[in-house]
Amino acid sequence: MDRPARSYTAAMAGTIMIVEDEPAVARGVQVALEREGYAVSVQPTGEDAIKNFADLAPDLVVLDVRLPGIDGFEVLRQLRRETRAPVLFLTARSDEVDKVVGLEMGADDYLVKPFSVRELVTRIKALLRRAYGELADTETGRTLRRKNLVIDLERRRVTRDGERIGLTTTEFDLLRHLAARPGRVYTRSQLLELVRDYDDALEQDERTINVHISHIRDKIEPDPALPRYIRTVRGVGYAFAED
Ligand code: CA
């Protein structure tokens, strides 16, 4: 969906979805985030959030636990089927915090109400930096074009010569980070750090990255044995090829 109303500044800073049924809380957060240049969409129920998620394609979700209808936990469970966008929970009680932390269901951070809006803004900036790296600050377009490859950051889609390439969440994020900075060499541990939350971190070591890169090459490279997109930098790691 096109969003012509989105200002240049907002497009650079990102779009944030707030799922919150208390208008005063939602409004306070919205005003503070808009002041920072974010485009903000408030969804009063979990059902609304799920229904509108694909169209809004937010870069981050602020999600209240207690909602009318389905609760925040269920919203997150459903959203995680289609997105790895960072989610920050708003909780009202410490037993909810236990659940957020204990479930390890994919929330990236949480704040307990009542919270300081300034603190929330700080946390959101940190989450966006972590999730999107330097893209969050510098990438003005939402699409990366590299040779025959088109990486649509908003829809998380990759095409080569117009043909859709199916990548896993981890593969997409590795490719996106590499392609954002052609020529920049990333060590395996840096790349692992970028994706480590996505899989079972305990099982991962740096060899995991080699496996992911190999899978990405099988999918994007015309000849995976002679990669033209992702170069191996011997003894160091990987870099996306410069044009
Ligand atoms: Ca609530």
Image (cartoon, rainbow, N blue to C red):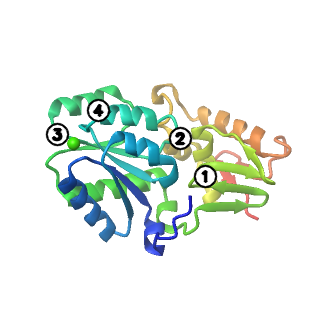
Above or below, 172 relative to 142: above
- Viewer-side label of 3, 2: 3
Residue 87: % across, % down: 37, 44
Amino acid bearing label 4? Val
Q: Is mark 3 within 8 Å of ligand 1?
A: yes
Give the residue at mark 3: 92
Say which quarter of the image contains residue 106: top left
Left or right: where 165 falls relative to 92 = right
Q: State if disc 3 and disc 4 touch (CB < 8 Å).
A: no
Give the residue at mark 1: 176
Q: State if disc 4 and disc 1 touch (CB < 8 Å).
A: no
- Which secondary structure, mark 4? helix
Question: First in sequence: mark 1 or mark 3?
Answer: 3
Amino acid bearing label 1? Arg
Kindly report the distance in space between the C-alpha atoms of the residues bearing marks 4 and 2: 24 Å
Give the residue at mark 4: 100
Left or right: where 63 falls relative to 221 = left
